[in-house]
Image: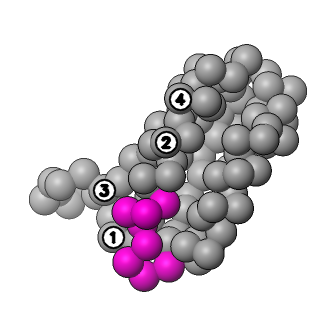
């Protein structure tokens, strides 16, 4: 199994617009071959010393894929290209971590 942690930093005030586009695109991703999990997450509203906030302009995408080939096909899919084009002007930075179990 392949795990992906994508850290998306939006331009100031644009996180909501990106998340709206993410939610619209999510059903197409979940229908892809090999997609096990695909979810956006933001800081939990907790007051805890164990939390390191990612901030109001950031969110993370947590993904699980059956195989690396499935992930690579996802990255090339037409709906992901459209999502990237639609959100490009709203994104400040994107860091993608592709991981496997230790």
Q: CA distance from mark 4 to mark 3?
A: 23 Å
* Disc with the residue nearer the chain's start (4 vs 1): 4
Residue under circle 3? 43
Q: Nearer the viewer, mark 4 or mark 3?
A: 4
Contact between labelled residues 3 and 1, with CB atoms less than 8 Å apart: yes
Residue occupying image coordinates x 83% and y 32%: 73
Contact between labelled residues 4 and 2, with CB atoms less than 8 Å apart: no
* Disc with the residue nearer the chain's start (4 vs 3): 4
Contact between labelled residues 3 and 4, with CB atoms less than 8 Å apart: no
**Looking at the image, which residue sits at the far left?**
47
Residue under circle 2? 24
Magenta-colored span: 11-18
Q: Is residue 70 magenta?
A: no
Secondary element type, mark 4: helix
Residue occupying image coordinates x 69% and y 57%: 84
Residue occupying image coordinates x 53% and y 29%: 27
Secondary element type, mark 1: loop
Residue under circle 4? 27
Residue under circle 1? 56
Q: Is residue 15 magenta?
A: yes
């Amino acid at each position: 199994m392949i795990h992906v942690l994508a850290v998306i930093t939006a331009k100031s005030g644009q996180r909501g617009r990106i998340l709206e586009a993410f939610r619209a695109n999510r059903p197409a991703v979940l229908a892809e071959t090999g997609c096990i999990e695909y979810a956006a997450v933001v800081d939990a509203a907790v007051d805890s010393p164990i939390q390191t906030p990612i901030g109001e302009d950031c969110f993370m995408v947590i993904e699980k894929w059956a195989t690396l080939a499935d992930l690579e096909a996802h990255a090339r899919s037409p709906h992901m290209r459209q999502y990237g084009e639609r959100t490009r002007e709203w994104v400040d930075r994107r860091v993608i971590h592709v991981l496997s179990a230790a």
